[in-house]
Every structure is written in C-alpha cells, then in structure tokens.
Amino acid sequence: MTAAFRGRVEARALVLAAALLGEAEARARVLELWRPGTTVRLLPDGDWLLLFAEPMSLRAEHAPGLPLAAGPTGRIEVPRAGETRTYDTDALPEIDPAQWLDLDDYAVHALSPLEPPEPAPAVVLPPPAPAAAPDLRATAGVGETSASAQRLRAGMTTPADDRHEPVDGLLVQLALRSPLAGWLRGRHERYLQQLTRQFEDRSWDRALRDAVALAGSGAGGRTTLRLPGHRTGPLRPANSVTSGGGVIQYGSSSYGHLQRLYREAAESLEKEGRIQEAAFVLADLLGLPEDAAALLERHGRIRAAAELADGRGLDPALVVRLWWRAGQRERALEVARARGAFAAAIDRLGPLDQRDALRLRLAWSADRYAAGDHLGAVEAAWPEPELRPGAVSLARQGLDSEAPGRPALLAYALARRPDPAHLDEARALLAITHPDEADWRAQRVFARTLCVTEPETPGLKRELSSAALRAVLRGARHETDKAARAQLVKSLRKHADPLLGADLAQLPHLGERPTLHLSAESEPGRLPVEDAVALSPNALLTAHGELGVRLLGRDGRVRARWDVPAHRLVVADHGGTALLVAEHADVRDIWRLDLSTRRVRRWTALRVRELASSYDGSLLTVVDEDGIAFVETRSEQPRALWRELDRDHRVERLERTGDSLTAVVLAPSAVPGRATTREVWRWELPSVTLRSRSPLRDPRLPADTVDVLYDGDVTAAVVAAENSRTVRLDEPPGGRRWASVTFPGGAGLRLRAFGELVTLHDASGRIVVLDAERRALVANLRTRLG
C-alpha cells in the first residue's frame, strides 16, 4: 500500500495517530468508519492501522487519518520521518473494538407496540382567489338602453327571445335557411342602420349601450337570433363578455363594417380623453382585452389595466408587469410564482423602467432563496451587474451551509475578492487526475459555471479556465453527450492559456457503452423501504414508513436521521429541500425537511388523491376532487395558487419533471355514445401552458412484463422470473436497452428519477442507483440498522 496526501483516493486502509489524537478520539473515528469486515491493527510506534474489507473513496485532505491506497496483498508501506516502513499486516497485533463496549449498566426492556397516531385534521384546498374584476360599465358610464332601441326591439322577439335562452348554433343556421330568413335579416339590418347612425353621430352613450359584441369576442362565440338587449349590471373582465343576448354571427361584410365602426369609435374616444369608454369598446365589443390593457397602461391607468389583464387571463408576464407597476407587489409575485413568469416579466418591464425591472429581479432572487434554492437565487440575480455583489454573498452562504450545487456556487463565489479557502478548493477539484463520477460531475459543473462568470482578480479566469480545460479532457471517458462536451471545450479555450489550448490533445471518440446487467444485493436490508431517491452520487434519502427518514452515504452508512413517519418523498428540483409525506387513507400528513440545515418541521395535512414526486421548492402539484392544484408550500396555510381541469376530468396518473407535467386524464367524450375517453395531457412548466392532448395508447411491452414503473420522464418495464424480478431500462422512446437490474424476490419495486440519477428499490431494503447519463452503476446497497 502507498500513502496519498492529496486528491481523491480509493483507500484500503487508514493510519490513525492514536497517541496524538488520544484513545477516545481514535476509538470514535474507528467506530465512525466501521463496516463489516473491517479490522484494526497496532503498529510498532503505537499508531493504529484501520484495514477496510472493500476500498473506501476518500478525499485525502479531509480524511480522518492517512489514507493508504492498494498495494501488495498482506503488506503495507507507511511513511515515517522521511522513510517508508513495510509491515506484514497479519503479523501485527489486532485490536478488538468489541472490548470497548460495556453493556453492564444497560437494562433490557420489553416494548409493546403503540397504536398509530391519529392523523391531523386534513385541509381541503379552496379554489384560488379570483382576481379583482374591473367594473368597466360603471367606470365608462354606460347607462340604460335608449328608448329608440327599445321601440326597435318591441314586437320583434322570437320564441327563443321570450325564454331569454341562447339558441344553439345549428338552429340558427337552420333558421337562416328557412322562410323566416328574410324577416330575420330585415330586423338585423334595421338594427345595424340604427347603431351605425348612433356611432357616426358620436352619440356615445346610446351607441355603447346598444352595441353588440362581435362573434368570437366573448362567450366562446356562441350565436343567437336575438337582438342585443341593454347591458345590466357591471361588465367584469372575465373570460366571457356579458351582453343582453349573447353575440350575433353576421356575414363578413357586416362583421367588417362593425369592426371598423368600433375601431374608429375607440380611437375617437381615446382622443377625447374618454379612456375607460375606449377600453370598454376594445375589450368588450371588439374582444381585444390586450389592446384595452395597453390603452389603459398608456394613459397611466395601471391598476385598471392590471385588473383587466388578470381577470381576462392574459399573458402572465403582462399581468406581473402591470401589478408590479401598480404597486401591488404581493399579487405580482403570486402570479409570477404560480406561472413561472419572473424572467418574461422582467423582459417586459425593462424597456419601460430599468429600476423597477431591477427590483423585480431582486424579488425573484429572494423568492428562490426563500424556497431553499441557493443556486437558483444566485442565477436569478447574476445577469444584472448591480446585483452580483449580493449574488456572490448568497453563493458563499450556500457554501457555508452545504447547500446543493456546490461546484456552481464555488464558481460564483470566486467572482469577487475570492476567499483563499474557496480558491484552494477549486484548484484541488480541478487537479484530480482520476475522477470518479462524483468528481467528474463537479468538475464539469464548475467549468460550465466558470464560463458565465468574470472574476475580478487579474489572471484568475485564465488560470481556472486552463485547469478546467485539462479536467474536462481528462474526464472525457465519463462523457456521453459529444455536442455538449465540444461546446464546453470551445468556451473554455476562449479564456484558457492560448498555448495550452493549442497543445492539448483533441477530444477522443466516444464509443457506445455496453448494456449494464446488474443484480441487487442477495440479502434483504435491515429496514424496509417505502421510498428512496438519490440526490447525488454520495447522498441517498430514504423513507421507512413509521420508522422515519434517513440520509445515507454512498456506502449505505447513515449520515442523518429524522424520526418523522414518511411513506413518500417529494424532492425539490434543486435538491435542497424535501417534503416528507405520511399517508393515512386519503389524508397526507406533510413535513418540510431542509437538507442544508438538517431541520424538519411539520407543514400541514392535505386531503388529496395524489401528489407529484417532485416540486420546485415552492409549488406542490396535487390531485384532488376538483382537478389539479398548484399549492404554495411556504405559507402556513396551504393555498392553491392555480388550478387545471375540474370535477368532470379525473386524473389517473401524474408525472412531473422540472419543465413538464404529464397526466393521464379520464375526460368527458365529445363523441356521441361514448361517455369518457382516456387522454395524455402535457403542460409546459413553469408557465403551466397546455401543449398537447393525445389519446392514451398502450405501450409495446414484452409479453413477460408484469409491471411498469414510472417517475417523471423515466419508464421501466418489470419482467418476472423464478424467485426474482428484473427491471429493464430503455432509452426513450423505445430505444436500445441500457440497463437491467435483477432483484431477488422483487416485492414492492419502485423507481425514482432525480437529475441524471435513477434509483430502484424494493420493499425489503435493497437499493440500486444508476447514472442514466453515463450508463453506469453509482451504488448497490442494502439498508442497515445503524
């Protein structure tokens, strides 16, 4: 064995300076690193030699002792006072850690089982609070109908008018082809002539009271034979326009005539300073709420524009900008958070007010920080040079609190007056010559982030870019995305030493990786597993039902534990927080875990049918009796900020990733004779924009498939064999197989996906973690008691 003083090493042994540490500390370090097969030997100079049964991956600078790499079997070489001493391990005296345990003072008590705790009262989610709706009729001063219009309509009603019910569009078409067609056209022509005279005479009050909304401008384009009645009650900026009798579908010439009439009226009213009336014409008569909102904003009626845009469901970025400019910051942030509209709203706001755009960007960064997303907070602020000093401080806070995304945070932290410790950490990371997958990922993330930063220290960008370029080329054997690797190398070459860039070898060819054929541990774990998800190659979060939650290292050792019952884990996209969900029938008792501080607190209990397996750190997607709800998790009381679907649409399965939401929906059928239809609905996140609906088709699976596992956009087929089950992972869609994992027994198999990592586990505590990008094994372990 040979000693290692720097970098990551696969250590087969550690030398502990027992005389220097003290026996108590030496014992504590042995017990911390202990695993089956480990032995302790006494060296002649009094130091202890800790021998591992299997190599342990350690960073030499942070190791609890002097790491020794593999060497000749049965022999060790230990550096001492400038020379190397060789020992036969079998000849060294053995130290038995079992002798350190004194159990004489411990009493044994027989425990009786406890009744499970009663679930907390569940919260039924109310619908989102409706947006404030502007009373355009009141503000525009549109009053009652004129006497002339009443006389025009007198005696000319149809049976449908008497019932005051809209007539189906098909009936309208039939009526227009019947002997009544001439009479109907005549009454409508008289109405148009009367309305035209009112507009041409600029009799605005009478014209606006009697005007008809054009077909398609509201109410879903529903048609009627009735002439428009006067508008009673307020005209609110909802998704439909209230009128006396719906809308009339005129021919193209009449429609064009009314459109020109209304356009000219809106322009004239604006010139006369009658802004609210002009907005009424645009929004309710022409069906152009975007134009109406722009008009109101142009004339300084910002709040009215915001109410109109929000009530009519216009572009979320526009709604955020208007509420922000109106001073209603909380409503603006609520819409931005619910619809993922921060970036687009900043783009819309910048040309009008750079300072306001700066404040909104700062609020975005603060929002991500409050969600536990340190890296997201830094990235939100970074594009604005004025906010970069604060972003660097946030990056350093993230490093101090061990927040996720450390390599990227490290690159940002070096941009201004770098801390020597952080600079040394970056240099050590890039100097690793034989990186494992964890170090390789860290090097690549650091390199990518370095490309978008601009360190103030002269020469630092060149030094780090040169080191990062070497690291990226050394780790090429781990890469699978040739295009991404080439782009990263190109970006680094721009800032690296020019001579270095010219002398480095070209990128090696990436061959096709063979299919992984793996078997889980033959023995079951010591703890049953309800859910498990790998957050990184070195961190695995596991839920054990009533036995609590644990954070495991790559070797299966427990790094932290929480005595909170949990059957499901809902992990934030940034990996910094997780929701621990205990299931009691249709009630979900939910706790929030901050993985940076290791603190856990109870949040609420929800009465829902299903939860997504991930969230953005703020909004949790759930399915209840009223459809899909997006629930704010940072408030004391859960609130649904946005909803999709309704009680007529039943969601049978929900899958979420950071940029999409997919649901299998049982929806009412539009085909006569068919009650329902199953469809796959896909929304784009975070904007919650519906992108596609398609019929559900059964996937083509092997005949021996007994189950299908899902999470996010990862799907796997389970096939049965005698006394085992095998999980098969294929490249989407329907591509070549890249991994198959066999579980003995295979009861309770489940799949979880987080980033590039895929976690497979069974109910008995066997866990396998795979790297889907590199097509490689990350961990194969079983749960332990300690």
Image: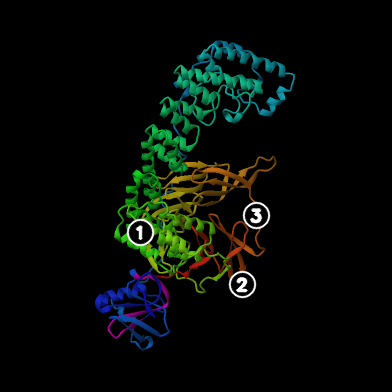
Q: How far is the residue under mark 1 from the one under mark 3?
A: 44 Å
Give, as a single range, the part of the protein colored magenta. 40-60
| Membership of 588 in magenta stretch | no
Q: Which residue is mark 2?
A: 722
Q: Position of residue 734 (x, y in %)?
A: 63, 58
Q: Which residue occupies the foreground of this view, 117 or 358?
A: 358
Q: Can residue 544 be spotted in the picture? A: no
SS at mark 2 in the image: loop
- Badge 3 vs badge 2, beta-carbon distance below 8 Å: no
Q: Is residue 595 left or right of residue 509?
A: left
Badge 1 or badge 3: first in the primary sequence: 1
Decide: few, some or many residues near mark 3? Use Cα within 10 Å; few <14, some 14-19, many ≥20.
Answer: few
Q: Is residue 442 left or right of residue 626?
A: left
Tell us which disc is closer to us: 2 or 1.
1
Q: Which residue is mark 3?
A: 698
Q: Amino acid at mark 1?
A: Glu
Residue at screen point 72% across, 25% down: 174
Q: How far is the residue under mark 2 from the one under mark 1?
A: 45 Å
Q: Position of residue 255 (x, y in %)?
A: 62, 22
| Membership of 58 in magenta stretch | yes
Type of colouring: rainbow
Q: Is residue 212 above or below residue 90?
A: above
SS at mark 3 in the image: loop
Q: Which residue is mark 1?
A: 402
Q: Please, what is the dominant secondary structure of the magenta stretch?
A: strand
